Image (cartoon, rainbow, N blue to C red):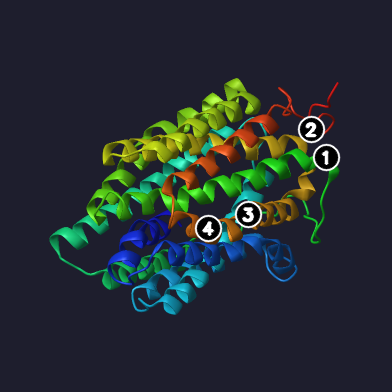
Amino acid sequence: MAMVFATWQTLLNNFVVEVAQFDGAQIGMLQSLREVPGFLAFTAVFVLLVMREQTMILVSLALMCIGVSLTGYFPSELGLYATTVVMSVGFHYYETINQSLTLQWLPKDKTAEFMGKSLSVKAAGSLLAYGVIYAGMSWLELDYQWIYLLTGLSGLALVAYLVWSVPMFQQGPIQHKHLFLRKNYWLYYGLTFLSGARRQIFVVFAGFLMVEKFGFTVTDITALFVINYLFNLTCAPAIGRLIKHIGDRRALIVEYVGLILVFIGYGLADQAWQAGTLYVIDHLLFALAIALKSYLQKIADPQDMAATASVSFTINHIAAVVIPALLGLVWLTDHGLVFFVGAGFALLSLLLCLAVPVSPSPQQPYLKPL
């Protein structure tokens, strides 16, 4: 997943500017459409009526690879919208079921550390993608179409290998296959909603800022991603252990304070090196989001994981569907204001996470006001 998605993500801003001639409003609309499948992630629980979770992960990976393979062949507005949605359906269904199985299968005292190691493995896949992009475009002088196609087909080949070589694992706790909202999970839902709103501002506009305002090339963007994932490769396992040691509450506080400062920095940045530095710091802070999933595992019923993962992805994407398109219009008049809105979302997250207990449990999922 990381290898194929990293290729799509790294090339996207340059592809839409240089080939498809997108402006801020169009990139905002594309990113909003990309998040529609995330908003509809609640439908994953219904797919589980006819398909095991492990099978669904493989089908989702294949669909994502097909969408990426076709991206370079449709460099028009409608064409990019269509291939992006295909890719996104596979990506978001994969992420939904991946979270569900992770929280089902792992002991609570191992989850944060395992997720740190998982981020490290994803970083290795992403670094492989960046190496292919650099070699393909700098040395072999391949165009976007070939890079997208080769990466997507390589992903499909790896999915086929997984289908044939990896056994079906024993089913964990029988999952509820209907949708619900639990009162005890309201704090998790709230933090998830704000995370989606905040994250979309970074995903959509931070990279676009560097390409449009500061003139970053594909090579420049790829170099930034390499730095990001080298940090994840080496530091993510340690961050997982740190979260286990200091607890979910403190980890979330550190993340949100850092993000407030980073977003304000984006809004004030007037030099390329400043934006690039903030981009690396932002990505490093993202690893601390492990704490939110760890918090859910500690307060939730094991049979709720699949349905809660589906619902939480939808909650995460409520704002994500709307914000890129709306802020894309704001972008046309004031770049900085877009990032100050992100700082506001980070501040709300900080205030809300103060209700997370030091030792969360099903009996104490949140701190009650005095």
Q: Is residue 228 above or below residue 314?
A: above
- The numbered disc on residue 303 is none
Q: Is residue 93 visible?
A: no
Q: Position of residue 83 (x, y in %)?
A: 46, 74
Residue pictured at 36% horizontal, 50% vertical: 209
Disc number lying in front (3 or 1): 3
Q: Mark 4 or 3 closer to N-term?
A: 3
Q: Mark 1 or 2 closer to N-term?
A: 1
Q: Residue furthest front?
A: 333
Between the C-alphas of marks 1 and 4, the distance is: 30 Å
**What crowding class fits label 2: few (fewer than 14 Cα within 10 Å), some (14-19), or many (20 or more)?**
many
Residue labelled with disc 1: 184
Residue pictured at 67% horizontal, 40% vertical: 191
Q: Mark 4 or 2 closer to N-term?
A: 4
Residue labelled with disc 4: 324
Q: Is residue 118 visible?
A: yes
Q: Nearer the viewer, residue 234 or 330?
A: 330
Q: Nearer the viewer, residue 305 or 43?
A: 43
Disc number lying in front (4 or 2): 4
Disc number lying in front (1 or 4): 4
Asked if residue 283 lies left or right of residue 277, the reply is right
Q: Position of residue 186 (x, y in %)?
A: 78, 42
Residue labelled with disc 2: 365
Residue type at tag 1: Asn
Residue labelled with disc 3: 319
Residue type at tag 3: Ala
Residue type at tag 4: Pro
Residue type at tag 2: Pro
Residue pictured at 43% horizontal, 54% vertical: 333
